[in-house]
């Protein structure tokens, strides 16, 4: 499905009825449903495959465009009808109304051979069931049942969807869904009925309850540092972020309890960072705010135009912190800098030098990793809210547009030597240096690795 956020200001009531009048200012698009889950997964892994149905219409084409830009490979099943589109009307960070339209339905036929193959070779699987009919197809259920024997599966259910297939490691209904699925509250009986290893009920800012085998029920709390942020009003996409984080953790060898702990933290930070807005792309406003032409196409390394992202944070009253660098090989010094920077405000934007910019600064043998990969690695850190790749040798020109409240650099720089310091201060921002972690330097790490490789080669000979 396609999700559309139409944002504006509401400062008066309509003369025809006591309802707010929204003056539309911005329009945002993103893939909805399982498409959002796939976009979030692509922030952690370069090899994300989405099995779904996409209608053959303009909005379906828009979804394909957004997924491709987000690094998601799509295996599409045929559908008839029009793309399901959900449009939220928002003002001052609040949703006032949601309008749904579209009637796309799956056409029953054998699955393309590449779908079972993708399922059987996956390191983990996340089923984001939105009740659209895909999990009701007998061929799909058979393929999922086989796949569940080869990789951990997380099933995010929906009251209108079908029951999870046997063998899921984790089933993740939210509190309202759990009450509909199990009115008598005996979720452990439901777990046994589904033949699932664990059931986890998500409860927003209150964390999650986990039922695993014969073990007592466990409550996983949101970390104290994230609790206030997790209580933000707009939690759109938090369930998808939770399910994806759990699937990623299971793929890396975590058990159900450890995966849920990681997923609770990831979902809370996702909400704190603005929720689904972080994977939205600006679109030009049409007569009904449902236009399909992006004003700037988001790349895999950034979810929003940087200036637009900063404006949205400021509209929410957040203190914007920015930092930048090449981040060629992410190490402890980088992580220390980014964590300290995030603590100085409410949102952290990281500016990453493009490949051309790195070569100009470091020489023809750098970077080691391309910009898209460097951006994805940085974006995967919980303390980072958004990443933007820039082409100039220094970020002065970009900072002149962004005007962050705080600009942060490592302590190996003197503030008076930073060419961008004057630009930041000109707009009332602060420039702060963070002490570096001794012994960690990308250039030194690369030189050491090359030296050891050369020594190993001589020893072998």
Image (cartoon, rainbow, N blue to C red):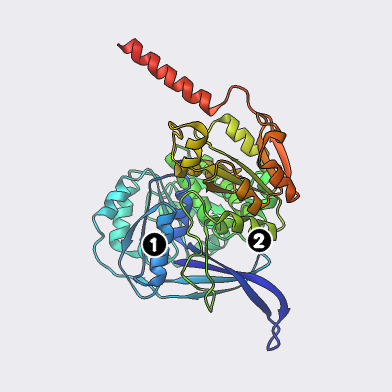
User: Which residue is at a point 47% across and 38% down the rendered structure image?
Assistant: 254
Task: Give the SS element for disc 1.
Answer: helix
Quadrant showing the N terminus? bottom left
276 with respect to 420 (left or right): left
Asked if one can make out residue 171 in the rendered structure from this viewpoint, the answer is no
Tell me where residue 341 sits by quadrant: top right
| Front label number (1 vs 2) | 1
User: Which residue is at a point 44% across and 38% down the rendered structure image?
Assistant: 252
Q: Position of residue 428 (x, y in %)?
A: 76, 49
* Image position of 451 with respect to 22: above or below: above
Residue 233's label in the rendered image is: 2
Asked if one can make out residue 292 in the rendered structure from this viewpoint, the answer is yes
Q: Position of residue 80 (x, y in %)?
A: 33, 73
Q: Position of residue 125 (x, y in %)?
A: 39, 49
Q: Position of residue 256 (x, y in %)?
A: 49, 42
Quadrant showing the C terminus? top left
Q: Residues within 10 Å of mark 1 (few under 14, many from 20)?
A: some
Q: Closest to the observer: 401 or 127?
A: 401
Mark earlier in primary sequence (1, 2): 1
Residue 64's label in the rendered image is: 1
99 with respect to 141 (left or right): right
CA–CA distance in space, label 1 to label 2? 29 Å
Most extreme residue toward the right is 428
Q: Residues within 10 Å of mark 2 (few under 14, many from 20)?
A: some
218 with respect to 232 (left or right): left
Q: How many marks?
A: 2
User: Which residue is at a point 58% across and 51% down the rendered structure image?
Assistant: 270
């Amino acid at each position: 499905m396609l999700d559309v956020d139409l944002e504006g200001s509401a400062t008066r009531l309509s003369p025809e009825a006591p309802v707010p009048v929204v003056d539309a200012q911005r329009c945002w698009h993103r893939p909805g449903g399982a498409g959002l889950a796939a976009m979030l997964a692509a922030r952690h892994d370069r090899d994300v495959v989405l099995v779904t149905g996409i209608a053959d219409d303009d909005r379906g084409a828009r979804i394909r465009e957004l997924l491709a830009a987000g690094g998601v490979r799509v295996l599409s099943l045929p559908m008839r009808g029009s793309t399901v589109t959900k449009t939220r009307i928002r003002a001052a960070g609040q949703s006032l109304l949601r309008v749904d339209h579209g009637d796309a339905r799956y056409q029953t036929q054998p699955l393309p051979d590449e779908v079972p193959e993708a399922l059987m070779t996956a390191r983990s699987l996340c089923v984001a069931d939105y009740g659209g009919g895909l999990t009701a197809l007998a061929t799909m259920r058979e393929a999922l049942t086989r796949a569940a024997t080869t990789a951990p599966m997380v099933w995010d259910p929906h009251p209108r969807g079908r029951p999870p297939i046997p063998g899921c490691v984790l089933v993740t209904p939210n509190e309202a869904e759990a009450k509909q699925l199990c009115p008598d509250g005996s979720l452990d009986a439901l777990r046994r009925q589904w033949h699932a290893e664990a059931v986890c009920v998500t409860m927003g800012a209150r964390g999650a309850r986990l039922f695993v085998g014969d073990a007592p029920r466990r409550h996983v709390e949101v970390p104290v540092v994230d609790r206030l942020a997790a209580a933000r009003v707009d939690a759109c996409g938090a369930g998808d972020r939770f399910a994806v984080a759990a699937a990623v953790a299971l793929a890396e060898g975590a058990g159900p309890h450890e995966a849920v702990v990681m997923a609770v933290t990831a979902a809370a930070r996702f909400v704190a960072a603005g929720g689904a807005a972080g994977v939205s792309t600006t679109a030009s406003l049409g007569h009904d705010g449902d236009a399909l032409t992006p004003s700037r196409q988001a790349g895999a390394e950034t979810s929003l135009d940087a200036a637009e992202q900063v404006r949205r944070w400021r509209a929410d009253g957040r203190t914007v912190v920015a930092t930048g660098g090449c981040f060629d090989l992410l190490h402890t010094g980088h992580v220390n800098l980014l964590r300290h920077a995030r603590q100085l405000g409410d949102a952290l934007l990281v500016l990453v030098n493009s490949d051309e910019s790195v070569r100009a600064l470091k020489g023809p043998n750098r970077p080691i990793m391309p910009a898209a990969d460097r951006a994805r690695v940085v974006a995967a850190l919980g303390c980072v809210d958004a990443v933007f790749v820039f082409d100039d040798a220094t970020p002065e020109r970009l900072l002149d547009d962004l005007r962050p409240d705080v600009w942060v650099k490592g302590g190996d720089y003197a503030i008076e030597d930073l060419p961008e310091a004057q630009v930041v201060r000109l707009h009332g921002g602060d420039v702060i240096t963070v002490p570096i972690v001794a012994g960690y330097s990308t250039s030194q790490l690369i030189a050491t690795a090359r030296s050891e490789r050369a020594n190993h080669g001589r020893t072998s000979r």
